Image (spheres, rainbow, N blue to C red):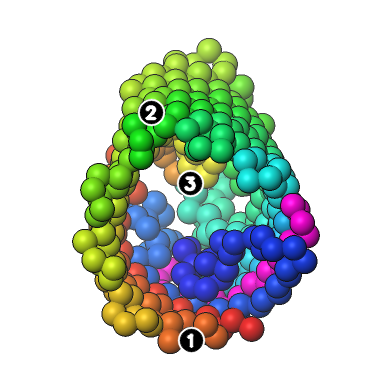
Amino acid sequence: MTVFGGATRAAGQQLPSSTGARSFAITATVDTLYDSNVVRGTPLNPLNRQAHTDDFRVSPSLFATYNRGTGRIALTANGLVGYDFFRYNKYLNSSRYSGGGSLTYHSGSRCQIAVTGNVSSRQDGIRDFGTPVIDPSGTRTDTAGTIIDNVEMASSYGSNFGCGTPTGRLTFGGGYTHSSVSNASVLRKFGDSENDTYTGNIGVGILKPGQVSLNGSYSTIAYPNRATGSLINGIPPRLVNSGVRTYRIGIAVSRPIGNRLSGRIGASFLHADPSGGQAAYSSPAYTLGLTYTPTARLSATLSGSRDISPSANVGALYSVTDQLLADVRYTLGRSITFNANAGLVKENYKQGFAIPGEPARGADSTTTYGAGISFHPRSLFNVNLNVSQSIRRSTPTIFDYRSTRVGLTVAVHI
């Protein structure tokens, strides 16, 4: 579930830059959400029809952040604790915890190096709608309708650096990130993963005031507990060496066009190399970002991209994702902001396989549109109201769904 509101914005606060500066803040948030289709698709088992398709969720949380700047060093630390309460589908109730921070060193005004880390825990109760199986003795068993009590632990750490010449004509940087996901339940172990990503870029200001940059990335992800098939008639699933290496190299151009329009357009080449002798995948890709600001109060953005993403929680080794997003914002006075948005996301799943209770996925196409209003009369608190409609068409159609979501968030900053 997406959590709207002050806690998310607080996580993105800027690090202190002045010598000796420090700050500490706590944000208390109550996020309420109505979802007309929590089930997210046609039931695979009659027991699924006993669940409430629509539901109402209340999610209180506390987010704390501490910033400290000392000379060229900036430190930030943050933590979150929260809980999700559902009115009908109680098995979806879950707790959330996270903590992390970063340490940044500024070398004059030209370079900076940052080290980051984060760990999170999420209770992940899932109703098992799996199909009946027959064990070696011929006994028919059916775990459908039971609750899979699971805790998902995620962690990440890494570092990055960026440098530039005094004139800004040349910039370069790079980074490394390691992330992992671990599930406590044996039935969800297929979602465990280990991921390493390396990135690099170099930009040259040859289209002043714009810039041309070369960028690239290399990523490896391994799923230590992936298997194809399921235990049917006593036949165990076929183990696979489930992992994939992905490569991306590209060029991008960014520059303002007049006083009201700015943009970034990039072209790149993607390649995925699955382990275990599975078929490789290659494709051209793109990035697009345009911002139009006709007045100080009105702005519009359009963004698009194609990328390769790991698929940790669905029955596929990885997916090719195309997305196109548009957003319009209008600020009324100093305290009210209206926004409207629309998006199209296409997921093409590669190396699909069946996981407990679900068939292999082929592709998804999800259309989302919505509107919202943000009211922030003072720095002490803010209120956000968001309404959206999502429609997903899938292959197979068992994953089709239509959902209306209404979210109201109240955040108080202490």
Label 1 sits on residue? 378
Could you say where residue 195 lies in the image, as x and y percent from the top left?
Answer: 63, 35
Q: Nearer the viewer, mark 1 or mark 2?
A: 2
User: Residue at image x 47%, y 33%?
Assistant: 169
Q: Is residue 50 left or right of residue 91?
A: left
Instruction: Look at label 3 and name its amino acid.
Output: Gly
Q: Nearer the viewer, mark 3 or mark 2?
A: 2
Q: List the residue tagged with mark 2.
A: 206
Q: Give the amino acid type for the residue marked by disc 2 in the picture.
A: Ile
Inspect this view and state whether residue 134 appears. Answer: no
Q: Is residue 378 left or right of residue 78?
A: left
Residue at the disc numbered 3:
357
Instruction: Using the rendered image of the protein, determine whether residue 218 is visible from the camera's viewpoint.
Output: yes
Q: Are marks 1 and 2 in contact (CB under 8 Å)?
A: no
Residue 160 percent across, percent down from the top left = 65, 39
Residue 55 coordinates in the image, percent (x, y): 41, 74
Label 3 element class: loop
Of 245 and 152, the residue lying toward us: 245
Q: Is residue 185 magenta?
A: no
The magenta segment is 50-73
SS at mark 1?
strand
Please say if 348 is above or below 83.
above
Mark 1: amino acid: Arg
Q: Between marks 3 and 2, how big is the CA–CA gap?
A: 55 Å
Name the magenta segment's main secondary structure: strand
Residue drawn at x 53%, y 12% is 277
Label 2 crowd bin: few (<14), some (14–19), many (20+), radius 10 Å: few
Mark 3 vs 1: CB contact within 8 A: no
If you read the primary sequence from the N terminus, does the residue marked by circle 3 or circle 1 appear first?
Answer: 3
